[in-house]
């Protein structure tokens, strides 16, 4: 694993940045993955036993969001557990955690505890509703946070219930990605001032920010709060997905007048037979015309007929996306230890971001990672003997599995 750190120091734009990740689920690991992808040295603090994954995957070695970092197993409830984290913190630029407000304080690794050993530390906190407010201690998942922000009410077809946007808007976009941005901004500021600070990232707040444009549209009266009646929410006939002759799907997004004209030409629809493009009262009837036209050819026939114009794209299934010629040439996906996954993004002209290897099993690198961060061998021995840390063998199958419990 030492070679992983050495290779990253040569390429990633965040090489030299040290981050302590207190193991969590969802947005915390996504944030840590982003930082690790770009070259940061991230040490993940996992439990000594009972570590868990949430979702369909139960194998830590295939959990894509855990890629690119080393795992140390620490018993945070052990009298010396906090000492392990604080020793790591003393040499770190940032720490990220995803507990409910007040938990890390009770464990002895809260912001004040960490600032006492490293005043420059940036302390990133990831929660659903934030560190304060009436809902600060409320439980929830992505759907709850995007509901609270107003975003969920905007997503869905006309006459249908709100549609959960996977976990993209709360966990990953409004949560982990914004936490990564906040951490990097605060590290930049700390390097100028010598003072760290707390970054309070809440998924409810972040998903509201992702929908900034639409809150603005509602405020100025240009967006209807009736789902599925607007230009990019499946209301417009020229911005939707239509089923093709072979039962697959075609996405069209021809908003501008010249692209709309191209779309009609590709679909073989005479513009004279249609109302004005932006006559919203006629959109439902126009959608039927579009749907009938698209059903006359297969998906790939339409893509070939469009030849890159008219804002037409195939709706690729996930496995199709992996082998799509454009994605292959761009290297959009990579295979790591037999698991196909998105490559690090964005791309850099000099300091390429890479995936160094498969995700770790909890505690796989306990001794090596602590030593690499400058902790003395006798101190590591003391903690291991006392049970504050554990070196876990990843080749034992039960050490690769999560329990599914949160």
Image: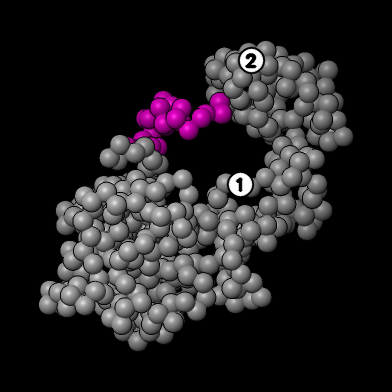
Where is residue 363 shown, x and y percent of the image?
26, 61
Furthest-left residue in this view: 378
Residue 235 visible (yes or no): yes
Q: Which one is nearer the viewer's eye here, 246 or 305?
A: 246
Q: Quadrant of the N terminus?
A: bottom left
Label 1 packing within 10 angstroms: few (<14), some (14-19), many (20+): some
Label 2 packing within 10 angstroms: few (<14), some (14-19), many (20+): some
Q: Up-down: is 370 above or below 247?
A: below
Residue at 53 percent of width and 67 percent of height: 127
Q: Which one is nearer the viewer's eye here, 404 or 159?
A: 404
Where is residue 274 shown, x and y percent of the image?
82, 22
Which stretch did the figure color magenta? 314-335
**Where, by quadrant of the figure, is residue 326 drawn?**
top left
Q: Earlier in the sequence, mark 2 or mark 1?
A: 1
Q: Up-down: is 405 above or below 397?
A: below
Chosen colour scheme: one colour
Under tag 2, what secondary structure? loop
Gap in Å between the C-alphas at discs 2 and 1? 27 Å
Residue at 40 percent of width and 80 percent of height: 107
**Where, by quadrant of the figure, is residue 362 drawn?**
bottom left
Residue 206 visible (yes or no): no
Q: Circle 2 is placed at which residue position?
A: 245
Say which mark, if any, is on residue 165: 1
Under tag 1, what secondary structure? loop
Left or right of residue 147, residue 117 in this image: left
**Where, by quadrant of the figure, is residue 69 drawn?**
bottom left
**In the rendered structure, does residue 149 fall within the stretch colored magenta?**
no
Left or right of residue 110, residue 249 in this image: right
């Amino acid at each position: 694993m030492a070679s992983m750190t050495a290779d990253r120091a040569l390429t990633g734009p965040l090489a030299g940045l040290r981050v302590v990740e207190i193991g969590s689920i969802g947005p915390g690991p996504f944030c840590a993955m982003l930082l690790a992808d770009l070259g940061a040295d991230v040490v993940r603090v996992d439990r000594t036993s009972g570590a868990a994954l949430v979702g369909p995957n139960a194998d830590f070695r295939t959990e894509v969001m855990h890629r690119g970092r080393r795992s140390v197993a620490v018993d945070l409830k052990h009298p010396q557990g906090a000492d392990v984290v604080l020793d790591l913190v003393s040499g770190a630029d940032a720490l990220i955690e995803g507990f409910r407000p007040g938990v890390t304080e009770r464990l002895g690794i809260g912001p004040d505890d960490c600032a006492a050993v490293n005043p420059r530390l940036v302390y990133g906190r990831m929660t659903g509703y934030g560190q304060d407010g009436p809902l600060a201690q409320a439980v929830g998942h992505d759907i709850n946070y995007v509901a609270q922000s107003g975003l969920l009410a905007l997503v869905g077809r006309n006459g249908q219930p709100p549609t959960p946007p996977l976990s993209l808007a709360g966990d990953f976009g409004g949560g982990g990605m914004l936490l990564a941005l906040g951490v990097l901004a605060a590290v930049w500021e700390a390097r100028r001032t010598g003072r760290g600070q707390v970054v309070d990232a809440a998924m409810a707040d972040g998903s509201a920010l992702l929908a900034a444009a639409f809150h603005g549209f509602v405020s100025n009266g240009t967006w209807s709060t009736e789902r599925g009646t607007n230009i990019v929410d499946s209301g417009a006939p020229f911005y939707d997905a239509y089923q093709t002759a072979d039962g697959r799907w075609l996405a069209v997004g021809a908003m501008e007048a010249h692209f709309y004209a191209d779309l009609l030409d590709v679909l073989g629809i005479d513009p004279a037979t249609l109302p004005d493009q932006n006559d919203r009262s006629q959109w439902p009837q126009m959608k039927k015309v579009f749907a009938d036209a698209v059903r006359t050819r297969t998906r790939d026939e339409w893509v070939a007929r469009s030849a890159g114009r008219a804002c037409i794209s195939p709706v690729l299934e996930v496995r199709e996306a992996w082998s799509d010629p454009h994605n292959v040439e761009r290297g959009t996906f990579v295979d790591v230890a037999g698991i196909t996954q998105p490559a690090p993004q964005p791309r850099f002209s000099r300091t390429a971001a890479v995936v160094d290897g498969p995700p770790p099993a909890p505690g796989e690198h306990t001794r090596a990672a602590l030593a690499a961060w400058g902790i003395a061998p006798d101190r590591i021995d003391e903690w291991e003997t006392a049970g504050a840390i554990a070196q876990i063998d990843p080749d034992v199958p039960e050490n690769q599995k999560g329990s599914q419990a949160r």
